[in-house]
Amino acid sequence: MIKTINIAEGETANLYQYLSAAVTPRPIAFVSTIDAKGNKNLSPFSFFNVFSINPPILVFSPVRRVRNNTSKHTLDNLHQVKECVISLVTEEIVQQVSLSSCDFDAKINEFEKAGFTEVKSDLVEPARIKESPINFECKINDIINLGQEGGAGSLVICEALKIHINKKVLDKNEKIDPFKLN
């Protein structure tokens, strides 16, 4: 027996569940941004991956809120300051990451709310996350809006300028051990 979904007739909430559950496993981009006034934001995104090596391109997609069709602070910030830090999420920090996904006011420092330690980045303004084993300092090459309705994503194309890797996730050959990323 087959369940068939006609996309044109589906509800956005149900489509989200089917798409996000079907395309797995997905890594989580934990994105640090700032706005033009210097307000800091942290937010996790499960629509994330690497798309090029030369240049090194990472892509993630903030999705418009379905309930009220508004954009997330991360996307608003990226339109103002075209830089971010993408950090990887491990099991050890997953609860803190989940807390940062709450819908805080734009002026609330989510590093403090979620208990993360800010580390000054070398090349971009947004801070790195000390507790994450891998941080990518990125400039934004492009933002492509994929729709205007609630549930529509914006493809954020980031070029990694610098990578910071905690040696505890490396093997004896200085390669990343995916088991150590946990």
Image (cartoon, rainbow, N blue to C red):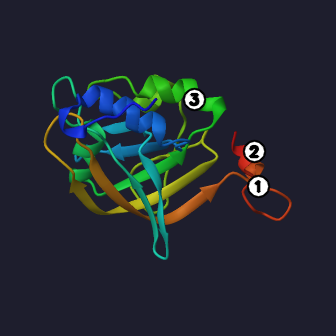
**Do the numbered discs 2 and 3 sit on residues whose CB atoms are within 8 Å?**
no
Residue position for label 3: 94
**Crowding at label 2, few (<14), some or many (≥20) Cα neighbours within 10 Å?**
few
Quarter holding residue 123? bottom left
Looking at the picture, which amino acid does disc 3 mark?
Val
Q: Is residue 55 above or below residue 103?
A: below
Q: Nearer the viewer, residue 66 or 84?
A: 66
Relative height, residue 142 to residue 15 (above, below): below
Q: Quadrant of residue 149?
A: top left
Identity, as a three-letter code, of the amino acid under mark 2:
Lys
Q: Does the residue at mark 1 contact the one at mark 3 (Cβ under 8 Å)?
A: no
- x 39%, y 30%: residue: 3
CA–CA distance between discs 1 and 3?
20 Å
Q: Which of pointers 2 and 3 lies earlier in the amino acid sequence?
A: 3
Q: CA distance from mark 2 to mark 3?
A: 15 Å
Name the residue rendered at 57%, 61% in the picture: 163
Q: Pointer 1: what residue?
A: 170
In x, y percent, where is residue 16? Answer: 34, 33
Disc 2 versus disc 1: distance between alpha carbons?
8 Å
Residue 52 screen position, x and y as percent: 47, 69
**Circle number at residue 180:** 2
Contact (CB < 8 A) between labels 2 and 1? Answer: yes
Element carrying mark 1: loop
Answer with mark 1 or mark 3, whichever residue precedes in sequence: 3
Say which of 127 and 182 sits in front: 182
The local secondary structure at tag 3 comes to helix
Label 1: how many residues lie within 10 Å, few (<14), some (14-19) or many (20+)? some
> Would residue 154 appear left or right of 123 to someone viewing this image?
left
**Amino acid at the residue labelled 1:** Leu
